[in-house]
Amino acid sequence: MKKYCIAVALLIAQLYSSAQEKDTIALQHGAHRSGNRTDADMARWRTLRLGQFIHWGVYAITGGEWKGKTYNGAAEWIRSWKEMPHADYDNLYKQFNPVNYNPEQWAQYAKGMGAKYMIITTKHHDGFCLWPSKYTRYTIASSPYRKDIIGPMVDAYNKEGIDVYLYFSIIDWNHPDWRTSLKTPADSVAYGRFKIFVKNQLQELLTRYPTVKGFWFDGTWDDSWKNDGAFSDELEQYLQQLHPGLIIGSRLRADEKGARHFDSNNHLMGDYEQGWERKLPEKYADVHGNDWEGVMTIPENQWGYCAKWAGHIKSSNELIEMLARSTSLGGNFVINFGPKPDGTFRSEEIQRMQETGSWMKINGNAIYGGGYAGFDKQDWGYYIRKAGTDSVFMVVCNVPVSGNLRVKLPPHTTLLKASPLAQPSAEITPEMIGKNEYFIQVGNAPRTAPFVILLQTSTGAENGSFEKART
Ligand code: H79
């Protein structure tokens, strides 16, 4: 027995030291899980693929302009502009009265677009709360509108079957105790109070809106926050205990060394990688097998309402291509909208919601529940595998002048059938051009949007050919 115990102890010590070799730094507040979450809530998140982000707050009133001058930063940041006196900004709430706010209509737009989840700014960096928080007076309750914005929004979206996530900024320009760094003992005392305020507000949000699925944290890059990994760790655990299944991206967390998103051993913290803001991964290797989400603005960098959009404005086709790329790399894609101060959407945004929705009506089957296919990327677009199946969709964005789309199958895969998703009966006979390699001939007539070809494959068999599979 004694011998047995010694052997077990040695084995444990060995396993422990090899784990230590891999994880060079012993961390108390690093990642607590390796690999993606496997529970039902996260499995659901993984199927949603298309989301709607909404940035709305008192910054919508300025729309990126103040006293005849135009701010050339992001409109929701206008309070930080030297031309904008804080006193002016901090009184804007007295004019915030979105009389045309119609949450049912918002939810219908989102549903029409094909969004399966939405993220709403409950509080951006300016500190203004769209819900009547009992922990500050700087809320919608002090505005002429007075009514809660968030509750009716959660109800309306949920009624349309859309999950709601709450954006919450840790930066709070309105709160006297918020600090970017802690230089004096008095700063530490103030920030200690601020952390309690944050925790209270988050608990309040979960209590008021119990159907929400997660938080989308922002503004966590300041020294005050990132040098307190213990707090972000405890906060994350507290919220997930309060609300089992709650989804929180990697942006909330820092470890005790100040590493953000990924801990000092390079393990992802939180439930998915949340660093993809206005940029997307190029290739599957970039996401390291982690769940991830990309958030995208329609103009270059405007989240809140900006009256004069400048620079390149993304078309619906560009957004659809980004959605296809994100799905093909196993991530969710979220398109941002910045409603006007009266509660309505600008026409360019309505158009993009409608055009994206028209496309999703025909092609959504390639997106929802889709993921990385394991095929070699080709120039014509993106492969998406319906998770756990042998159905692989080709989202075609660029047709070569030949009209032939090259498909190279991975080893042990057989091509059984190819057909346009929009017209399943119009089967296409692939032309074999090499071992496990085909042309799918689609012609080169001009097209106005990406289109989808569904490949039925089978795996596990010997390397087969289309001809063999047909007999
Ligand atoms: O809400 C939208 C933006 O207003 C917000 N995130 C999206 C979803 C956002 N805030 N800041 N940023 C995006 C850009 C951050 C830039 C940073 Fe920095 C560069 C953070 C750290 C280095 C600028 C310079 C801010 C602090 C120092």
Image: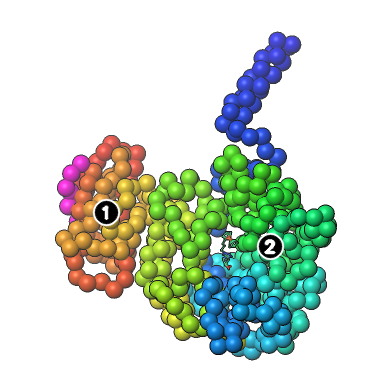
Report the residue at 42% width, 63% height from top: 323
Report the residue at 52% width, 54% height from top: 292
In contact (CB < 8 Å): disc 1 and disc 2: no
- Identify the disc placed on residue 170: 2
The quarter of the picture where the N terminus appears is top right
Q: Is residue 371 above or below residue 448?
A: above
Q: Is residue 105 visible?
A: no
Near-viewer residue (180 or 212) = 180
Residue highlighted by disc 1: 417
Is residue 8 highlighted in magenta? no
Which structural element holds mark 1?
strand
For the record, the magenta segment spans 429-435
| Tag 2: amino acid | Ile
Q: Is residue 297 above or below residue 370?
A: below
| Tag 1: amino acid | Lys
- Identify the disc placed on residue 241: none
Near-viewer residue (6 or 390) = 6
